Image (cartoon, grey):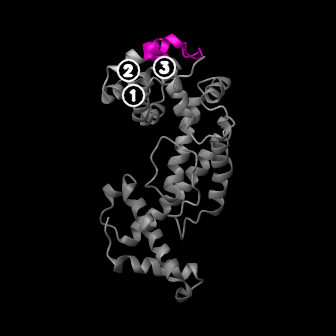
Amino acid sequence: MDYRMEELIPIVADLAKQYAGCDSTSITYENAQELMQGVIFCLDEYWNSEPNHLCKRDISVMEQYQTGAQLVLEKVKNVLNIFNEMSAYFDDYNVICLHDTVQKGIPEFLKWYDAKFFPQNTILTLDYPILENIQCKYGVDAVYVFMRSVQTEQKFLSLFDRNYVMSILKQMVPEYEHMIENIASIVLMNTIGHIALGKSLRGFGFQEEEYQKLSDIFSLNSLAETECLLKKMVYRVLQEMGASDSQIYDYLCKDVKNIAVRIEYAVKYHTLDKIFILS
């Protein structure tokens, strides 16, 4: 959404007075620029949040900003709610990156996030890689999507025995505690191998002779065909584990293209044992 400068300056000037203690002339040019970015962030929040952009087109820019600022505060509360709710069942599986990003980083974000003046600042680097792309998101928008993604992953991983998850991670990366990879993706790839072979998801590992069967299953497909097949397999994984949550399915399907590419490469170079863990 494009705005005229004369529509934004009064909002920024008001914020500058509050930020500088009524003396807006004392703030630096850099601070003024950041305040402007914060205003635009809140306006974007307004326009990107249903159903505001559908039913309130005729309100002033100031009202749009105020509504957007309120939405930012609500999203911060949502981050806190997810953090509190997840604390009852959160498991980092001894992966330091996940532990530090969630258990150390999120409290720091909630402590220092300035929703009023600088809502565009993410503060955290969010090092743990999720399956959702948040490269173009900032501030609480990025943190909210991150936390929602981690929560969905935790629900998926909780379908499996903890020792099963950790065994897969350890065989994939011996010093997995220090890895910076997505845990759900690793577990999902392994379970897809079980589904492809018609094996029980409660079992563990693959035999050498099964890799040829997996190669035969995937080698004749195009990348697009493999992606379609994988989506069906993801659905079957969740179905067999008794999970009917469409949110988990939608989230895991964001990793389908990545898995398809890895399988295609592994079939070509005979490295399927790097994806589907040998028992």
Q: Position of residue 72 (x, y in %)?
A: 50, 59
Q: Is residue 201 magenta?
A: yes
Res 218 label: 2
Would you place residue 270 above or below residue 129 in this image? above
Counting every numbered tag in the picture gives 3
Q: Is residue 56 visible?
A: yes
- Separation (CA) of disc 1 from disc 2: 7 Å
N-term-proximal mark, 1 vs 2: 2
Q: Residue at x 32, y 71 (%)?
A: 3
Amino acid type of the residue that numbered disc 1 sits on in the rendered structure: Glu
Secondary structure at badge 2 equals helix
Amino acid type of the residue that numbered disc 3 sits on in the rendered structure: Gly
Res 264 label: 1
Q: Residue at x 38, y 20 (%)?
A: 218
- Part of the protein shown in magenta: 194-214
Res 193 label: 3
